[in-house]
Image (tube, helix red, strand yellow):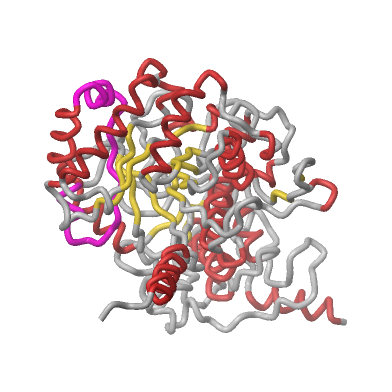
């Protein structure tokens, strides 16, 4: 029986709607230029524990691709810039590359995209004339292997090909690349692929000479007088990230391409920098990536394309300490090679960031932190930070060992566990660090521990009550020379202020 035409059209419409309603995802880039690179199997185990579903590799490393087999993680592999010339000139080279690096691993390894080069136009301009040919040759090889509907092909571009990205509505691609960019966009439209964009608000902020506020780059809410508005469209931009993505959409529109979605293949923020890199801090990196995850997972697009989610890959999983360049270049990673977090971050959008074995992260004092700074941090945590420091008072479960690092660790962690969902960080002027190792001992249970029903982490809170003359509350540890105050003294202060 032949179905009525209207039924077939309605069915196709339903498929289109369902396809367009896929939730946005956050993925990660995995670079390997680091001293202690974990084994491929360790990387995959870590990704699974962190519920990371999408990764981008800069090449097609056979060991990594084998490790991803049967993991269901979607993998984007890369044709290196050095390989483009040969692949662009010889279709046989493209066929050999696809057979070796893609077809040989599918379906066990879930390869879904190929990034041909990286920022070719701005970093390897001599390759530009043959980029389109390389894209076509790779796609033809996929067709020959019957993989063209599963694996998309594109080429990551930097913001550098849009010389004036703000206001977004007037953004265009650099005229010097018009021919190559037009060929790229024509290919993407014909193959139903997407525009790969490397968008870094960190560089947008640091090179703008103070034109844009830091909060704008970090996704923080701006006051009404500082809000960024496109004067031509009157669209409001709550983040530089959105403005960058929209600049790409408007630039494509200027060349009469309006149906190609943007996928951000790289973005992030460095957690440390050298002299002259004041914005590269742990706090800024944590703020940026935490807010980025929330932004992407709200499943909306930029102001001009609100219905198209911005699938995004964070740069990067591990900091690559062997990379050349300034200090910031070596500090983009969100994890250390041992699997611990550089700062708390959940890529699934939840409040907690899981450790590799599924347990919580803890915030403790750094082993090399100076005592006077730990005193300040401890006093702040137990005072203004409103950590429950009763357990580290004399006679209570976490008082011993009676030293500043032990007491600071307990207070830091109590504050962090209670406040991380509201934006609290594990920093304390650089004296703290996160760890997946549970620091609980004997009857001293740290907040967040699986044993927190012991007498440590869940010790009944003291009254926080009235503010003391020194700021904070009556639970504050008020001296710097003696960094703990007996519990009775703290209660006495509270009673005095109530009189």
The x, y position of residue 249, in whole percent, is 57, 42
- Answer left or right for 61 relative to 194: left
Residue furthest to the right: 499
Tell me if residue 68 is in the magenta stretch: yes
With respect to residue 67, does 407 lie above or below? below
Q: In percent of the image, x 40 and y 78: which residue is there?
A: 443
- Answer left or right for 296 relative to 3: right
Residue in front for this viewpoint, 261 or 237:
261
Tell me if residue 133 is in the magenta stretch: no
Tag count: 0
Can residue 372 be seen?
no
Q: In percent of the image, x 40 and y 58: which residue is there?
A: 435
- Answer left or right for 153 relative to 388: left
With respect to residue 153, does 473 lie above or below? below
- Answer left or right for 201 relative to 270: right
Residue furthest to the top: 126
Q: In percent of the image, x 26 and y 41: which residue is there?
A: 37
Q: Quadrant of the N terminus?
A: bottom left
Residue in front for this viewpoint, 464 or 482:
464
Q: Quadrant of residue 93?
A: top left
Magenta residues span 65-90
The x, y position of residue 394, in whole percent, is 55, 73
With respect to residue 188, does 496 lie above or below? below
Can residue 286 be seen?
yes
Residue in front for this viewpoint, 196 or 224:
196
Residue in front for this viewpoint, 477 or 165:
165
The x, y position of residue 159, in whole percent, is 54, 32
The x, y position of residue 499, in whole percent, is 87, 82
């Amino acid at each position: 029986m032949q179905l009525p035409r209207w039924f077939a059209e309605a069915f196709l419409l339903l498929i289109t709607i369902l396809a367009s309603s896929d939730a946005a995802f956050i993925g990660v880039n995995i670079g390997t230029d680091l001293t202690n690179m974990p084994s491929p199997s360790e990387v995959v185990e870590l990704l699974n524990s962190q519920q990371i579903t999408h990764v981008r590799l800069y090449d097609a490393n056979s060991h990594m691709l084998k490790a991803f087999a049967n993991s269901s993680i979607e993998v984007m592999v890369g044709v290196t810039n050095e390989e483009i010339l040969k692949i662009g000139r010889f279709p046989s080279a493209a066929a050999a590359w696809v057979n070796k690096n893609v077809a040989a691993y599918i379906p066990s390894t879930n390869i879904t995209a190929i990034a041909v080069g990286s920022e070719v136009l701005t970093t390897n301009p001599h390759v530009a004339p043959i980029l389109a040919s390389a894209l076509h040759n790779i796609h033809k090889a996929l067709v020959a292997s019957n993989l063209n509907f599963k694996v998309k092909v594109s080429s990551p571009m930097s913001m550098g090909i849009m010389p004036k990205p703000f206001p977004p509505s007037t953004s265009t691609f650099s005229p010097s690349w018009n021919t190559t960019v037009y060929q790229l966009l024509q290919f993407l439209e014909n193959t139903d692929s997407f525009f790969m964009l490397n968008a870094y608000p960190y560089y947008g902020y640091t090179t703008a000479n103070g034109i844009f506020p830091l909060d704008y780059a970090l996704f923080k809410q701006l006051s009404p007088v500082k809000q960024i508005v496109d004067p031509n469209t009157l669209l409001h931009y709550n983040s530089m990230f959105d403005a960058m993505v929209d600049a790409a959409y408007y630039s494509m529109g200027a060349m009469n391409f309006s149906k190609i979605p943007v996928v951000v293949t790289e973005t992030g923020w460095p957690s440390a920098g050298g002299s002259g890199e004041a914005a590269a801090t742990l706090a800024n990196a944590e703020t940026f990536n935490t807010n980025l995850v929330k932004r992407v997972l709200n499943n909306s697009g930029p102001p001009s394309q609100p219905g198209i989610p911005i699938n995004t890959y964070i740069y990067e999983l591990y900091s690559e300490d062997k990379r050349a360049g300034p200090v910031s270049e070596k500090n983009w990673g969100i994890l250390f090679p041992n699997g611990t977090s550089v700062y708390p971050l959940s890529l699934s959008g939840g409040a907690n960031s899981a450790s590799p074995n599924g347990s919580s992260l803890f915030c403790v004092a750094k082993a090399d932190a100076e005592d006077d700074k730990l005193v300040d941090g401890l006093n702040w945590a137990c005072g203004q930070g409103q950590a429950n420091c009763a357990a580290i008072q004399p006679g209570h479960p976490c008082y011993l060992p009676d030293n500043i690092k032990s007491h600071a660790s307990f207070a830091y962690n109590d504050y962090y566990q209670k406040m991380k969902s509201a934006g609290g960080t594990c920093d304390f002027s650089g004296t703290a660090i996160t760890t997946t190792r549970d620091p609980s001992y004997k009857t001293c249970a740290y907040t967040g521990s699986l044993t927190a029903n012991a007498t440590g982490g869940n010790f009944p809170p003291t009254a926080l009550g009235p503010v003391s003359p020194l700021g904070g509350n009556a639970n504050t540890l008020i001296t710097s020379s003696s960094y703990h105050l007996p519990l009775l003294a703290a209660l006495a202060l509270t009673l005095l202020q109530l009189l």
